[in-house]
């Protein structure tokens, strides 16, 4: 099977999976209690039966359930996520405005968690049984067990309120009107706390897996042969142990990369980060069905995308996978 055929097969399965997720989300969301027409009528100050009926007719809420579902799926196939009756704008436009901020946050957190997790895992495996190994593994366990929202609140309290080192909220300084390099620096300073907070949990996971995987690989015969040849420990660790031990870490990282979007809901809410996670939180309170479903679809698409990329990267890291395909 060629690489292109493999990728095409993965993409076809991904498309079918995305449609199935869209249908499931639609069913679950519409099964929840509440009526968006009542929410809109209440905000307008006119909750009489005639106004509610007009709102239902205007936004298609008076149509049979299967008709609404069919129109929604057909819209997804046409890359149309619908219209937000709460914010008066296309859902795709609302998500497009917020998506760059979420991608910046999640990708920064992903890089931080992966780089630090692998680095600390290698350091811990190289110092097995020493005090530094115990300290690193204890910190990993602490970060793994700490609730994300609590870590976010403590980060704001310590580094923003008490120490005043970093801004605690927002995407950039309001009213500063920075341009060029000053604007990038300002965004980077606002990015530090949410990105590090979001990446701490995943960093702990990657560190523990890297450490365990390196200890397992270090006991294999080919590593013993390399030591018998007189190779330096640093060369053995880098070329022989780490290269083989990193394979399960790559798999797990690819699977969890999309989960960062889920964690971003809490992080963006605490840090007032203007991404799609915060958009979904606001839409839940407003019973904005179309926007919620749109965010679900985009989030699911990101998860599926990372899974496909993981398959491809895994083949590059381990050529044996490609040879058996």
Image (cartoon, rainbow, N blue to C red):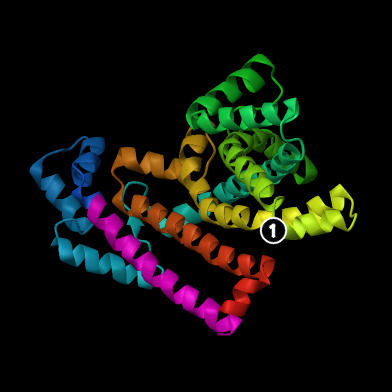
Q: Quadrant of residue 174?
A: top right
The question of residue 8 being in magenta is answered with yes
- The residue segment tinted magenta is 1-28
Give me the residue at 58% from left, 85% from top: 2
Q: Is residue 171 left or right of residue 23?
A: right
The C terminus sits in image quarter: bottom right
Residue bearing the label numbered 1:
244
Residue 167 lies left or right of residue 90; in this view the side is: right
Percent of width and height locating residue 47: 15, 38
Q: Residue at x 21, y 57 (%)?
A: 58
Q: Is residue 43 magenta?
A: no
Against 244, is 126 above or below?
A: above
Which quadrant is the N terminus positioned in? Answer: bottom right
Provide the secondary structure element on which disc 1 rests.
Answer: helix
Q: Is residue 22 left or right of residue 192?
A: left
- Main secondary structure type of the part rendered in magenta: helix
């Amino acid at each position: 099977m060629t690489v292109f055929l493999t990728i095409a097969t993965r993409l076809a399965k991904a498309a079918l999976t995305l449609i199935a997720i869209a249908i499931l989300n639609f069913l679950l969301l519409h099964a929840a209690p509440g009526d968006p027409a009542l929410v809109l009528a209440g905000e307008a100050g006119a909750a009489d039966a005639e106004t509610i009926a007009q709102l239902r007719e205007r936004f298609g809420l008076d149509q049979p359930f299967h008709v609404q579902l069919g129109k929604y799926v057909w819209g997804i196939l046409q890359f149309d996520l619908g219209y937000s009756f709460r914010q008066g704008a296309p859902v795709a436009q609302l998500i497009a405005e917020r998506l760059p901020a979420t991608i910046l946050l999640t990708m920064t957190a992903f890089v931080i968690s992966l780089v630090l997790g692998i680095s600390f895992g290698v350091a811990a495996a190289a110092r097995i049984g020493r005090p530094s190994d115990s300290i690193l593994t204890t910190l990993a366990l602490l970060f793994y067990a700490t609730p994300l929202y609590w870590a976010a609140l403590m980060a704001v309290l310590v580094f923003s309120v008490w120490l005043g080192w970093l801004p605690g909220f927002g995407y950039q300084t309001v009213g500063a009107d920075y341009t060029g390099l000053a604007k990038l620096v300002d965004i980077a300073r606002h990015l530090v706390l949410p990105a590090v907070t979001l990446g701490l949990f995943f960093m702990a996971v990657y560190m523990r897996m890297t450490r365990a995987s390196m200890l397992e690989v270090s006991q294999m015969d080919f590593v013993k042969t390399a030591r018998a040849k007189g190779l330096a420990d640093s060369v053995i660790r880098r070329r022989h142990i780490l290269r083989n031990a990193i394979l399960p870490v790559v798999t797990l990282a690819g699977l969890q990369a999309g989960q960062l979007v889920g964690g971003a809901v809490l992080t963006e809410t605490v840090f007032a980060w203007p991404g799609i996670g915060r958009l979904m939180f606001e839409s839940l309170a407003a019973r904005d069905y179309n926007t919620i479903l749109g965010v679900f679809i985009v989030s699911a698409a990101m998860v599926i995308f990372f899974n496909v990329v993981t398959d491809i990267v895994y083949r590059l890291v381990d050529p044996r996978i490609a040879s058996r395909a």
